[in-house]
Amino acid sequence: MSRNIQQGKSRILYCLLKTTQSSYLTYPNNNSIDTIAQESSKPKVKGSETEEPQRYTKLGWVKGKQVTVLGSLEPVNVFLGIPFAAPPLGDLRFSSPRPAIPWLNLREATSYPSLCFQNPEWLATYQKVLQVHYPKFEVSEDCLYLNIHAPAHADYDSSLPVMVWIPGGGFETGSASIFDGSALAAYEDVLIVTIQYRLGIFGFFTTLDQHAPGNWAFQDQLAALLWVKENIKFFGGNPDSVTLFGGSAGAISISSLILSPLSTGLFHRAIMESGVAIIPNLKGLDDKRKSDLQVVADVCGCNVSDSQALLKCLREKSSLELLSLGKKAKSFTRVVDGSFFPDEPLELLSQKAFKAVPSIIGVNNQECGYILPLKDTPEILLGSNKSVALNLIHVFLHIPAHYLHVVADEYFHDMHSLTEIRDSLLDLLGDVFFVVPGLVTARYHRDAGAPVYFYEFQHRPQCFKNTRPAFVKADHTDEVRFVFGGPFLKGDIAMFEEATEEEKSLSRKIMKYWANFARSGDPNGAGLPLWPVYDQDEQYLKLDLNIRHSSSPPVVDTAHGKVLGKYVSLEGFAQPVAVFLGVPYAKPPLGPLRFAEPQYAEPWYFVKNATSYPPMCSQDATVGKLLHDLFTNRKESIPLRFSEDCLYLNIYTPADLTKNMRLPVMVWIHGGSLVVGGASTYDGLALSAHENVVVVVIQYRLGIWGFLSTGDEHSRGNWGHKDQLFALRWVQSNIVNFGGDPGSVTIFGESAGGESVSVLMLVPRASASFHRAISESGVALTPGMVMKDGKPIAEQVAIAAGCKTTTSAVMVNCLRQKTEDELMEVNLKLSCPFLPTVVDGSFLPKSPEEILAEKNFKTVPYMVGINKQEFGWLLPLNVPEEVIPAVIKEYLGGAEDIVKNRDLFVDLIGDVLFAVPSVIVARHYRDAGAPVYMYEFQYHPSFSSDLKPETVMGDHGDELFSVFGAPFTKGGASSEEINISKMMMKFWGNFARNGNPNEKTLPAWPEYNQNEGYLKIGATTQAAHGLKDKEVAFWTKVWTKEAVEKPLQEKN
């Protein structure tokens, strides 16, 4: 639920909302009931610990049954089909409920009662759509019954909290019996009561006068609550601690009961899941209701003005005839009857004419994602254009045509694809019917002085992975299976089969929140993420596998203007992380700034929204998406966009922004061969939260845009590296406002990002911008990553673009005139679109080999690492042809074993590209006096592609999942993998804090000195020495020989 819904959309829709917007039951004297039952004033409880529990009620004794649930030793007593009112048949049809008739014999309460009369086909359809299962139920007008689920130990003196569930179903379908309260009762030690009430025309027909004022369904609910008040103590419940909870129409009913003066004293707290009384279209239009009343009169052959004759006729109709009639006359819904509803719900709220009770109000993040449109407008699920969408809004919501442009501007601005418009239309419907009414109601309750807690449920249950379209998020009613502990039920009501372990955990948490609220009016408790009260800051809880709350969003000053972020919580951490996405650190490199030094961003004088992922820098979209999918540590998918306007960074800070904190800063430079990749692939949440560090993830120009070099002043090249340095300077100037310490900045990166880190360490003008460095699987000596002359490649690019190559100025000017799409076509035309780092004589004054040999670099603490099988699966072959014979002899010898040859060949390539260059670079820094730590990663992460063989241990990029805490952001990891990730984040965090990864609780990591100690990281983590020392000796010899012989060959 975004902030703009809470503000802009709520104002629009609230205005539209305003334009669309009992005789009482008493029981016989208690003394007479007690006389009939021949019981004392404190009845005995029979069978509390047996399989046939018996309980007294003021109408007679009932016998139930005992059940158990998965994961709990506490049995549950179940009583099914207890009557709370007389059957509403004959003259009692369309009248207030009457007391049930007492019974003298022990009443069996072990069978499900009949459902209130409805179309039974709907139940069969809902079972399939909702992935639930229950027995075949009968339907009948004799249906005013309730079910009770109570912990087996509960007796008269237990005084347990009572939770009364009012089921939903659009007031047309539904039942108490399709909801099994056993798990909630067993796990949370509460009593669960599920009730039934008349539906459709049976529950809402009205003659609009005193003969049949209507609202029978609500009157039934009052009767059930009065029964609870009079009898629940006999089952171990506290009649003075009754919490109503319900979903959809059940939540609407609860919201209505709060507004009704007739409900006073019958309940004490309320939970409304996806429904409130002010939802549009609940009130039938007056003209339509009169028209439908005439339809009924015509069927009965009566005068519409003769209410008594009309009622007599209808009471003689069969149930099926009335059900059929209800399909024709659909306007019979709730009415302002002067009794249950003294006025319209919105008026009662605005006048504060209701008794406010503590409440939980919530919505799901796609209320109209699938179930509701599937019933009424299934065609829009395939896609929709604007005209169809606006016409549907006009017809369904009765929004006047001259207001439709306002809605279009808010929801469909700059949208053209059918799926984009469909998704926004579904959001709009969810906002109109659920989100905005829920927020408006929450504000009225809050302003009336009642504690309010608001939530947004955001998890799409796994059981729908093959039955719902992929675009559907948390749909209407998806939370219910979690509330009732569906994963733990094992009876004939199946609410949640095949739940994952994470979903079981979420269900336990939600049950705990709901039960805590039922106990005290506050959902918070030990072991649960904080749920803030919904006050003037309008904080709410996001219910997902990683539960987090939304507080007042963080706003931070930068040198260019204020930025608005968002708070995101990680399970197990009380302090949320402030996240800022797409913060500009430089001016868009467009027009004359293409192939030019980055420039300062233009200042802004408003609060810039930094809560959306920035576009990735221009690249091959197919390859970019593939790389993102392979390496992201995010569970949710994010929209990927690509643009030349891409010089943005993302910030994750756990700092309390109200205090002057100075946390270590870790700046991540992504990999991708300098041609693909982006910041948003990497979620810094887990690393930031676990290690209490500020994580900054940057983007930089790639490919042609980032590394085109003509070797002269017209295009020096290294634009991507210059962007990286510019971002680091932005960090120096601004990170203190995000709680970071500009005097403690660690740069770290992988693959081309690791090479970038290594290059920046050799750049003179970068020396003041960071203080520690980590290169993962990439250094400046990696073959092919650095070139002395980039002009030949620049000429290839120019030719492919149709530009002349007469001079550098001509080439660069021509390429600057090309559109982004035209340059991308050039990129795709090139057989090898890779453009490397260049020795430009300025930014990088000499080759890395020369700078390292001269020790002309800043010595900072340096961590350098490789993976055991860098060429295990992901990377392509890239070995100079002339050295292949010697290489084969060294690595393969005369072996004929195919599997062994494969493994040796994999080692060969990994050594050439990563291991040997990394060791050589580490030795240079060691010999220059810098603290150096080396590692070899040797683990197969569960998050790797399913295509990767299990035998590959430590492929290129595999360590990323542990470094960025994928087990905590994606979930589903083994305890072993969780521990490895915790350990690696701790190593990296320690290094960022003080230049040394060690601490007492971790395996000892030796410094890389003359003994060349290093750390093997994997299922078993231990120190070793001499990483690739033999291979380094061999390749040094090969490369030295090549360096001597090649000039001679060229001379000859």
Image (tube, grey):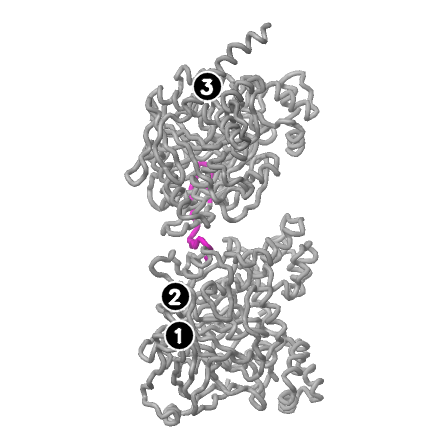
- Choose top left, top right, bottom left or bottom right for residue 382: bottom right
Badge 2 is on which residue? 72
Is residue 453 one of those drawn in magenta?
no
Of helix, strand and loop, which one carries label 1? strand
Camera-near label (3 vs 2) is 3
Q: Is residue 766 above or below residue 357?
A: above
Upstream in sequence: badge 3 or badge 2: 2
Badge 1 is on which residue? 150
Indicate the amino acid at tag 2: Ser
Of helix, strand and loop, which one carries label 3? helix
Residue 957: image location, x then y, percent: 49, 36
Q: How many marks?
A: 3
- C-beta proximity under 8 Å, tags 3 and 1: no
Badge 3 is on which residue? 1034
Furthest toward the left, the residue is 1000
Kindly identify which numbered label has been placed on residue 358.
none
Q: Which span is picked out in magenta? A: 543-563
Residue at image position (68%, 25%) is 800
Residue at image position (44%, 75%) is 193
- C-beta proximity under 8 Å, tags 3 and 2: no
Indicate the amino acid at tag 3: Phe
Residue 136: image location, x then y, percent: 57, 75
Residue at image position (61%, 84%) is 207
Residue 171 vs residue 777, the one in the foreground: 777
Indicate the amino acid at tag 1: Ala
